Structures are given as C-alpha cells and as structure tokens.
Amino acid sequence: MNFFQTQERARVASRWLIVWFSLALCGVVASLYAVAVMMKSWLATDHYGQQAATAWLDPDLAVSIGPMAGGLIVLGSLYKLTQLSAGGSVVARDLGGRAVDPATTDPLERRLLNVVEEMAIASGLPAPETWILDDEDGINAFAAGTDPANAVVGITRGCLERLSRDELQGVVAHEFSHILNGDMKLNMRLTGWIFGLVMIAMIGRMLLQLLRHVRISNDNNSKGGGVVILIAAAGAAVWLIGSIGSVFARLIQAAVSRQREYLADASAVQFTRHPPGLANALKKIGGFSQHGVIRSPGASEARHLFFASSDLLKLGFATHPPLESRIRALEPDWNGGFLTAERQPPPPPRARHTAVSQITGAPVTRLVPASASFALDSLAESTRLDPRVGSIIRRDLRGANIGFHSKDEAKVLLYGLLLAQDGTGRENALVLLGEKTDHETTVAANDWCRQLASRSAAEKLALLDLSLPWLRRMSHDEARAFLQLNRALIEADGGMSLFEFMLERVLERHVAVGLGLRPVARMQFRALGDLQRETAILLGAFAGQSGDPSALDAAASEYRQHAGMELERLEPAACTLDLVATALARFEMATPLVKSQILRLCGLAAMSDAMLNDGEVELLRAAADAIGAPVPPLGHVGKAG
C-alpha cells in the first residue's frame, strides 16, 4: 500500500469535504435568514398580514444576515483550526491526557514506549510523543497532529492494561497508519470545521439560557411576554438550525472516517505482518463492558480520531465501521466470538527492553542489506516495512549501552553525532561547545563522539529519530538556542558534510515545526514539471555521490514519463548543498503525488549501482524528511549465519 497514493486520496477527500461543508454552511445561513425574516415580520405587528407574502425577499436583511452568520461560522472554524495548529498535544490535553515520560520505569508504560519506538524506527518516522488517558477505562487509542513533526499517539488506561504486547502493537500500527496515510491531518481539519457549525447550536443554547434571567413586569406583561416569546423562539430556532447543520457535518465526517478506518486496519496488518494482534484487540473491545467509550467532555469533537467508536452511537452517526465488519475483514473465518479483556500482568523486568523474539517468535538476530529493488519499494510501501527491523536496531543500541533518559542527554548525544562528523575541525567544535555550554557537557559529547564514530548510518538515524520526542520537550527559547548552537558546530570546520546537512534538515522540520517555531509549508506545486530546475539540482547531487555519469539514466527516463520533458543534467559540483536546501524547501510545497515521484527519482539515482553508500543514505533521508516522507531502514531481517 503506497503511502503517497493514500495521502493523495486523503487530499482529494479534503476537497469534497470542503464542498459538502460549504453546502452545509449555505443551508445553515439560509435557515438563519428565514428565521430573521419571520422575526422581522412578527415584530411588524401592525402590518404582519400584508407583509407576510413579500417579507421573504429582503435584500437588506440578506446582506446583514449572510456575512454575519457565515462569517461567524468561518471564524469559529478558523479559531479552532488555529488552536489545533499547535499539534496533537492540544487534542491530547483536551481529552485529559498525560504525556508519558520517556524515562519512565513503569513496566506497562515502558512496553508502550518500546512498541512506539520500534514502529518509528521501522517506518522512518520520528517517534511521536506518547500520551495516556489515565481516567479512561475503555479500550481505545488515537493519533493527532497536523504534521508528523507535531504528531502524538495516545492510548487509554484500559488499552494499556488489558491488551497483550501483540495486540498493543496492532493498535499502535493502526495509529501510525493514520499518520502515514494523511488521515491525521484530514481529521484535524474535520475537527475545526465541525466546531464552526456546532457553534451555531451553542449560540442558540445561550439564547435559551437567557430566559432564566428575564423577569416580566406586571405593568407591561403583554409586551414583556412578547419579548420572552421572541427570545425563546429565536433561541430554539437557532439551536435547531445549528443542530441540523452539525448533524449534516457529522454524517459527512462519519462516512469519510469509516472508510479510512478500513484502510488503516489493512495498513496496520501489512505493517506488523501479524493479523491476529489487531483482530484480537478488536475482539477484546467487543467483549469488554466499557468497549471503547471515552467519557472526557472533549471526546465528542474528537471521536473520529479514535481507534474504535468512543460512544455507542449507531446508524449513520457512527464514525467507525461495526467491530464485526472490521474483524471479518481481518479474519474471514471468524466464529463471531469476542474475547474477555482481563488485566494483563506487567512485563517481567528482563522483558522491559523488548527482544526480537517477542514480536515474531522467530530467532531473528541481524539486519541484512537490502537489494536495490527492495530498498526502492521500501521508500513508500507499507508492505515493505518490518517492525522487527526497529526491534533489532533498538536491541543493538541498547546492547552497546547507547541511549538517553532526558532532554539534556538527548542534546548531548546530538552534539556527539555532530562531533563525530567534524574530522579535522573537531577541536574547534569542542572549543566552541565548551564556550557555549559547560565542561561536563563537552566531555560527555566527546565521549559520545568516540562511541558513535563506528556505528552504522542506520543506527545513527535511529538515534536521531529516538531523540526527537525528548528535543520537542524544550521550551521555545531553549530550542532556538539549541538549533543555533548546532548550526555553529556545523560551521566550526568551515564546511558541511552530508550527515550534518541531513541532521540540520531533520531538526529544522521536527523540532522547529514540531514546536511551532516554523509553520508547515502550504501546498503550491501540483506537477513535477513545475519543479524542473529543483529536480535537476537534487538528482545532480545524487549523481555526485555515486560518482557514476550514468547514475541518472534510469531517473531521467522516468522523469520523461512523468513530466513530459527531458531532465536537465547539471554538473554535480554545481549542485551545492545550499542549492539542494532551496530545492527541498520547494518540494515541501508539492502535492503527495509529486513528492512520491521525486522520492522515487532520488531512489533510482541513489541505487543505480545496486548499492547504497552512507552519503546516498544520508541524502535520501534529508530529501525524504524535508518533504515529509518516511524512510525506513533499508534492510531485510535475517537469521544468524
């Protein structure tokens, strides 16, 4: 299943949602206009009978009601969307969630973080922040965010305590699928649009509540009674109209959400290669008295974000397909029986850092380099992602005692990664680090430098991804200072290596964007031909890494098919990293389909000789990360010997 294709379908779905929500908006505004006309006619008591037939056509009233009501709905939606632009943590906090401390020693929380980290490494995504809804006993989970850089994955206390590791892995894989498939961004937009329509019903409710504070004078009870009746009628009408608009919005939301849930289930099974895990999690939800119910007041607006239905609504209002249908899609021969959701015993101490055998039961012990065709397909296909790869890399890193337990340790490790690339400029970088930090930090970074120098590119990239949840816990001022110091360390030797270039691109996207220091780029380019010069620069850089003049032959042929023109071939020396950075910034503003095409062209150029050197891996990661694409570790899982 191609992630870019599913993201493109989500983008098309967003267009249709705009159309349907616009129709709902027009319906609500027209209904409000009708109420205003009736109120105006009622107030004109002396001429009510004469004006009733003609009062429906009132241009002055239409000009005032239309912009006011429509603007109110649009402003309400924009307010909510602006609030949600801060990332998934806003949703998690509104639901009463708690961010899991990455250094937690709680066995169940540690198991959850291990599963999330393995999925992150295997998919090439940065590890999202993990949240727990402690007050929710139902079995449920969610993913929220406007971009992978600010995504969060959350689960309920019931999910944490009542699912086995395989079942938990299936649920987490389902949520990762929503991130990869573009559903998460679509769902956040839905939340904002729904709020604008629901707000009309809220205003009607407020008008009805005003009646509690209205007192009618005995001297003028006729007129006072008329005012009360007017307020009551207006409030009831506005509330009813707003409710109808919100129902229409939720029906659209439910229809779209149901289809995306089937897609996420299928992607999760391809991801984990273990259908019983996800199927059994769904069976436990069906067999548990609480099901997937979420009791938080904020659950109503966010119910389309959850793994399973967060309420007991049926008919067209349900945002998820029936559990029975989802289970049968995974297990066609299912006998119809649900499972008892008993509390799971905590993992034994030795199992808190997962062994590979826990995932598959097979003695998988090493990572085998991938063939060129396998690696190329892995760039966008969920069928090529293997969570065992993430477990192997995590195991090897922990076996070498490489890790971190705080944001300060994560920062020091990043300094060590940069120092390991500096070569002759390392002494200058160490002096600079000592001036900007302290002696202890400098010594620790130098120790990491020596330890990381011999690690593989895949392991360094995994460490970078695993550090991001810690780094996103920095304050804005702390993050700015950290990014500035990293830039200074990179420039300390007077140049920039590919690894340093890649690392800076990753930090720029996942720390700066994740913390809201930089906005997510807006989509502008819808055809590969719109980025002809940028494509030439990027592919020229890959040709420079391979050292083979024919490295671009396959990419040039495919470019001709997509763009309908010849690829401009530039001298590799002319494709500087500054030009590559500018090109990547433009590709970030392309549609998912164009991003898919450029990533495949990069893969063809990098793998022209059926091999990937470290420079090509680092440039691939920089390119993919800049355009928001996951790059999994490019390898197979194999047995010892």
Image (cartoon, rainbow, N blue to C red):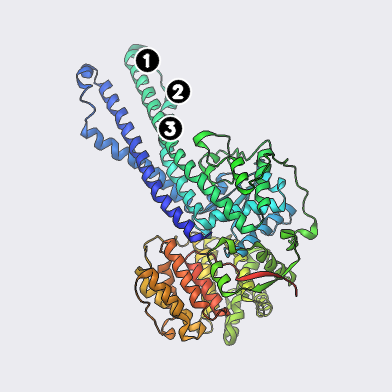
Where's residue 266, x and y in %?
58, 53
For residue 212, the mark is 2
Residue that extends furthest to the top in the rendered view of this protein = 218
Q: At label 2, which amino acid type do we have?
A: Arg
Q: Gap in Å between the C-alphas at discs 3 and 1?
A: 33 Å
Instruction: Using the image as rendered, state which of residue 260 and residue 93 is in the foreground.
Output: 260
CA neighbours of label 3 inside 10 A, class few (<14), some (14 to 19), many (20+): many
Residue at label 3?
A: 243
Q: Gap in Å between the C-alphas at discs 2 and 3?
A: 22 Å
- The secondary element bearing badge 1 is classed as loop
Nearest to viewer (mark 3 / mark 1): 3
- The secondary element bearing badge 3 is classed as helix
Q: CB atoms at circles 2 and 3 under 8 Å apart?
A: no
Q: At label 3, which amino acid type do we have?
A: Ser
CA neighbours of label 2 inside 10 A, class few (<14), some (14 to 19), many (20+): few
Upstream in sequence: badge 2 or badge 3: 2
Q: Is residue 470 visible?
A: no
CA neighbours of label 1 inside 10 A, class few (<14), some (14 to 19), many (20+): few
Image quadrant for the C terminus?
A: bottom right
Instruction: Identify the residue at image location x=60%, y=54%.
Output: 268
Q: Is residue 55 above or below residue 518?
A: above
- The secondary element bearing badge 2 is classed as helix
Nearest to viewer (mark 2 / mark 3): 3
Residue 559 placement: quadrant: bottom left
Instruction: Using the image as rendered, state which of residue 306 and residue 196 is in the foreground.
Output: 306
Residue at label 1?
A: 217
